[in-house]
Image (spheres, rainbow, N blue to C red):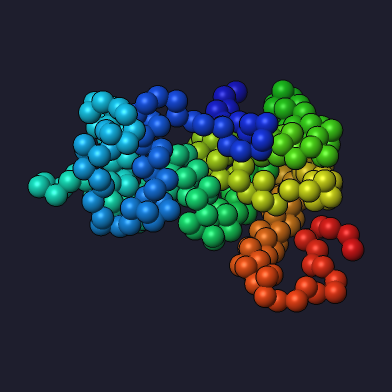
Amino acid sequence: MIQQKTRRLDSLGHLGPRMGSHHARVAAELGRRIVSGQYPTDSILPVEADILEEFRVSRTVFREALRSLEAKGMVEARQRRGTAVLPREYWHLLDADVLGWVAQSGADPDMLLRLTELRIILEPGACRLAAIAASEEELQKIEGALSRMRTGANNPSEFQAADLDFHLALLAATGNEYLATLGAVISTALAVSIQRTNSTDETNHATLPAHQRIVDALRQHDGEAAAQASREQLGDTMVSLRWNGKQSRTSHQSSTTPASPRAAKAPGERA
């Protein structure tokens, strides 16, 4: 059985910290500044002395942080110039930390849409595999996550954590270690996606039937039905993400544009 290694959502619904060491704290802050554009492509990071003073860390800690960012494809040392920020195409975008920094920075508004497209390609196929390969214990984990989604539907943080567990357990139940590992890798972005698309009690309740259809099909070892249920569930996710993106882009007009007599409703909400 494949061990799931995932990041937890804390009680406030935020992603829990992944890195706890001093060098990791420095790397995380520098990484966030890079993805937000504070340190743009080809710019040179502040000199060592300034970083040491700001973060109150040793030279050893700072250099370890730089090595971490270099390993993620975000920076490189340049002779006589310092440490330069590399173009985005060099970044390891499926690195869990890089995903988290990009997702939480809001620097890439289409990121969650693109990751959902990736899920639409992968998860229906994973459902086909899980319908054949899942053990009783793995099916019970998926069902347990769905049960917690139901009981936590009126509690956003509980629901979102259970929803994340559902999808990761589904990937683990395929018996394919590469799919399971990919699930762990994208868990950060998946958690952010769940937070964006299931932010109200009503949307939480609305998504439960699609998840139940996936479980029912898995129990019946019907791979095609499970895949179709997955496509429908992810299709709803895509619609919700696009709606949220549209609302975000137009929200700045609210102070100058008269309110509509009928407030807009999110997908899944009742009028």
Q: Position of residue 55 (x, y in %)?
A: 34, 33
Q: Viewer-proximal residue, 140 or 220?
A: 140
Q: Residue at x 78, y 73 (%)?
A: 259
Percent across and percent down for residue 133 are 66, 33
In the image, residue 265 lies at what x, y percent?
80, 63
206 left or right of 7 in image: right
Visible residue check, residue 256: yes
Of residues 229 and 20, which is closer to you in this image? 20
At x 40%, y 24%, the residue is: 21
Q: Residue furthest right?
A: 271
Residue at left 84%, top 33%?
Answer: 151
Does 253 appear above or below 136?
below
Percent x, y of residue 105: 50, 50
Left or right, residue 30 beside residue 169: left
Splitting the image into 4 quarters, where does residue 57 fall? top left
Q: Nearer the viewer, residue 74 or 174?
A: 74
**Quadrant placement of the C terminus:** bottom right
Give the quadrant of residue 161: top right
Q: How many marks?
A: 0
143 lies above or below 127: above
Q: Is residue 143 visible?
A: no
**Quarter of image, res 238:** bottom right
Horizontally, is 235 left or right of 119 in the view? right
Decide if residue 205 is on the left or right side of residue 118. Answer: right
Quadrant holding the N terminus: top right
Residue in the image at 21% along x and 38% along y: 48
